Image (cartoon, rainbow, N blue to C red):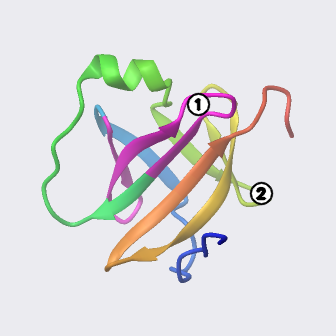
């Protein structure tokens, strides 16, 4: 059985800024919590918009996953990180009133 994409949530955030380990904030002040789904072969990360408080992960946890301090929306349903790597938007929707954004890091050299 194939997993279905979550219901649409409008446009994805234009920018996501690092606030503390595991926590990002978008241009509308929404909080996004990062969670690693897979480290290899293609590193994936995802976040959920959360109005409530969260338990941040340790700084070493952030470094293990190699998440950038900022992502900017890039043409073609992608984000470009501060290190110029591209991350594909796999899914952007809503689950139980929480926004969800699933990103997949693209191989180096992808444009």
- Give above or below for 65 relative to 28: above
Q: Is residue 38 visible?
A: yes
Q: SS class of the residue under badge 2?
A: loop
**Residue 29, position as x, y percentages in the image:** 30, 61
**Residue 29 visible within the image:** no
Look at the picture and state if 97 lies above or below 91.
below
Looking at the image, which residue sits at the far front? 1
Q: Identify the residue under disc 1.
A: 82
| Residue ID for mark 2 | 75
Residue 81 or 3: which is nearer the viewer? 3
User: Regarding mark 1 in the picture, which secondary structure is present there?
Assistant: loop
Identify which residue is drawn at 21% across, 66% down.
Answer: 51
- Residue at (33%, 23%) from the top-left corner? 61
Asked if the magenta segment contains residue 36, the reply would be yes
Around disc 1, counting alpha carbons within 10 Å, would you say few (fewer than 14), some (14 to 19), or many (20 or more)? Answer: few
Numbered disc total:
2
Magenta span includes 30: yes
Asked whether 46 or 21 is in front, the reply is 46
Q: Which residues are magenta?
A: 22-46
**In this picture, residue 87 sits left or right of residue 48:** right
Q: Is 43 on the left or on the right of 65, as rendered?
A: right
52 lies above or below 56: below
Quadrant holding the N terminus: bottom right
The disc placed on residue 68 is: none
Q: Residue at x 51, y 52 (%)?
A: 15
Q: Quadrant of residue 14?
A: bottom right
């Amino acid at each position: 059985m194939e997993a279905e994409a979550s219901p649409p949530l409008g446009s994805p955030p234009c920018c996501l800024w690092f606030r503390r380990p595991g926590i990002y904030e978008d241009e509308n002040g929404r909080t996004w919590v990062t969670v690693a789904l897979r480290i290899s072969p293609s590193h994936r990360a995802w976040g959920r918009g959360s109005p409530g408080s969260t338990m941040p992960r340790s700084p070493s946890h952030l470094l293990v996953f190699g998440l950038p301090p900022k992502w900017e929306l890039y043409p073609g349903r992608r984000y470009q990180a501060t290190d110029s790597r591209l991350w594909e938007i796999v899914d952007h929707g809503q689950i139980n009133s929480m926004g969800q954004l699933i990103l997949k890091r693209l191989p180096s050299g992808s444009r």
